[in-house]
């Protein structure tokens, strides 16, 4: 038996040699082991303690290997990423999708939104708050978490219209207010139904990772219908019931201090987003306010949530220089800021404040994954879904702005070059993974007769 096997092996080897000599190349009759191989990138995977030059191989939508010198012959598609960083797909835990405060029939012709706006006072209806989920791919982000745009009464619509159709992974914090965010809806204490909130979270626990409270009673005097801590207390009650963290968007007032929020109300694992907004006493006489470290010692999490009105260099720069860096970086992207803010932009600001590239990746991958109790995300562990960002650090002169219309100059900028989600190349605007057009396979030069005939593409790698 062993002799027969040896003979078969020898004949096969002879065949390979003869054919190899005849055609000057070894025929590749086997299906390659990997679908995709990213060669010679600088891999940063904080969850696994990796920081150095390595190759990353993908098979059937999952990470198959992360090691040095994986042979190119083992992969159907090889992408040279030398000079670039290869990191887990980034996680942005403060994003907005869906309608928000707009009426649910906003797009319908008979929507009240299309009525003439009043000449005085605020408009009666607002345009949708959320932006397309897949815009996140432009920054190497593969998981976004909607931060309370929808509440229990509007979540299903958001799920069916946006979440179920997005290419990027969309998770959500559920607004404690059943009607969701914006347009004054978050002022209704009656609308903060703890049981309905918790029931919805438990029913959609594959998507909903926490509770959000925001924008509650920030201007007018408190009254019988609006008690000081109603929104925070009810959000925490829902979080307790559904066993999930709460994300706070908060505005202190004389009756409720920031210290009370982070030292008394917030539970370990709860998240204060917008930490560098104008309204927080981050500094006392130029020094870091000690309540921040006291809150950290209790397990309270601090998140950036940059947004259109929640990031001031006067807080961020001195805080970071003194060693207080938010646990997670996030954008708070919505229709009011998406053309200025992005995850790359937020990360670039912190890079220019002196945070190392590897530390930025930690605060954009493994940290947010832990905060939303999804430790399987934000890592390149073998077997994980192949969510990958290929990032470049540019050097030059760059300007960065905050929400107080002040700027900070810097010498570095982070840009995403390629984004892979579950093994599919969904963002590659400079063609890192593509062939020079003159060298494309014959099929590329076809003029298709009918839609559905052989597509005129240079390769067949899944790209959408
Ligand atoms: Zn927000």
Image (cartoon, rainbow, N blue to C red):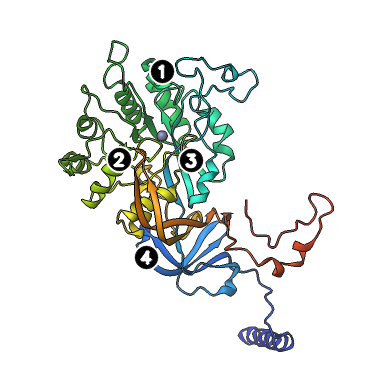
Residue 287 visible at all: yes
Query: Which residue is at 51% across, 56% downward?
Result: 386
Q: In the rendered image, is residue 362 in sight?
A: no
Q: CA distance from mark 1 to mark 2?
A: 29 Å
Q: Which of the two labelled residues, at mark 4 and mark 2, occupies the earlier sequence position? A: 4
Alpha carbon distance from label 3 to label 2: 19 Å
Question: How many numbered badges does the structure rendering display?
Answer: 4
Q: Judging from the image, what secondary structure is the residue with disc 2 in?
A: loop
SS at mark 3 in the image: loop
* Sooner in the amino-acid sequence: mark 1 or mark 4: 4
Q: Quadrant of ligand 1?
A: top left
- Picture layout, residue 240 above or below residue 225: below
Residue denoted by label 2 = 276
Residue named by callout 3: 338
Mark 1 C-beta to ligand 1 under 8 Å: no
- Which of pointers 3 and 4 lies earlier in the amino acid sequence? 4
Please name the residue shown 43% across and 26% down the image.
Answer: 199
- Residue 434 is situated, as x and y percent measured from the top left of the image, at 62, 63
Query: Which is nearer the eye, 27 or 439?
Result: 439
Marked residue nearer the N-terminal end (3 or 2) = 2
Q: Which mark is residue 455?
A: none
Q: Secondary structure at mark 4?
A: strand
Q: Which residue is identified by label 4?
A: 51
Mark 3 and mark 1: Cα distance apart in space: 29 Å
Q: Nearer the viewer, mark 4 or mark 2?
A: 2
Residue depicted at x 63% and y 56%:
462
**Dot placed on the residue nearer the N-terminal end, 3 or 1:** 1
Q: Residue under label 1, please give it.
A: 191
> Which secondary structure, mark 1?
helix
Query: Callout 2: 10 Å neighbours few (<14), some, many (20+)?
Result: many
């Amino acid at each position: 038996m062993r002799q027969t096997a040896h003979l078969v092996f020898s004949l096969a080897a002879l065949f390979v040699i003869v054919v190899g000599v005849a055609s000057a190349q070894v025929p590749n009759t086997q299906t390659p082991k990997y679908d995709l191989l990213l060669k010679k990138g600088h891999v940063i995977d904080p969850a696994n303690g990796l920081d150095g030059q390595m190759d990353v191989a993908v098979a059937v939508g999952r990470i198959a290997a992360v090691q040095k010198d994986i042979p190119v012959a083992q992969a159907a598609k090889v992408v040279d990423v030398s000079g670039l960083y290869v990191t887990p797909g980034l996680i942005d835990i403060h994003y907005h999708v869906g309608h928000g405060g707009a009426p649910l029939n906003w797009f319908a012709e008979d929507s009240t939104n299309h009525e003439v706006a009043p000449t005085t006072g605020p408009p009666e209806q607002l345009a949708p708050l959320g932006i397309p989920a897949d815009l996140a791919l432009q920054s190497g982000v593969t998981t976004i978490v909607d931060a309370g745009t929808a509440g229990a009464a509007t979540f299903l619509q958001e799920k069916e219209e946006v979440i179920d159709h997005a290419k990027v992974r969309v998770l959500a914090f559920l607004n404690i207010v059943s009607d969701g965010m914006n347009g004054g809806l978050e002022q209704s204490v009656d609308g903060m139904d703890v049981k309905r909130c918790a029931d919805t979270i438990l029913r959609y626990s594959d998507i909903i990772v926490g509770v959000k409270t925001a924008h509650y009673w920030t201007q007018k005097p408190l009254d019988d219908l609006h008690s000081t801590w109603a929104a925070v207390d009810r959000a925490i009650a829902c979080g307790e019931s559904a066993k999930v963290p709460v994300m706070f968007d908060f505005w202190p007032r004389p009756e409720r201090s920031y210290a009370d929020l982070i030292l008394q109300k917030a539970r370990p694992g709860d998240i204060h987003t917008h930490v560098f907004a104008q309204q927080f006493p981050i500094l006392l006489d130029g020094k870091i306010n000690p309540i921040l470290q006291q809150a950290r010692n209790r397990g309270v999490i601090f998140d950036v949530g940059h947004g259109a009105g929640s990031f001031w260099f006067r807080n961020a720069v001195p805080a970071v220089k003194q060693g207080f860096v938010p646990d997670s970086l996030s954008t708070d992207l919505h229709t009011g800021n998406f053309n200025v803010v992005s995850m790359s932009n937020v990360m670039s600001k912190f890079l220019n404040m002196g945070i190392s590239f590897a530390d930025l990746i930690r605060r954009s991958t493994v940290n947010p994954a832990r905060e939303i109790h999804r430790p399987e995300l934000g890592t390149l562990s073998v077997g994980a879904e192949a969510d990958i960002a290929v990032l470049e650090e540019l050097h030059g002169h760059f300007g960065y702005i905050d929400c107080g219309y002040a700027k900070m100059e810097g010498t570095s900028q982070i840009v995403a070059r390629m984004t892979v989600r579950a093994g599919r190349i969904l963002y590659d605007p400079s063609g890192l993974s593509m062939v020079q057009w003159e060298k494309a396979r014959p099929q590329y030069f076809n003029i298709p007769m009918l839609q559905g005939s052989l597509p005129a593409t240079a390769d067949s790698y899944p790209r959408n």
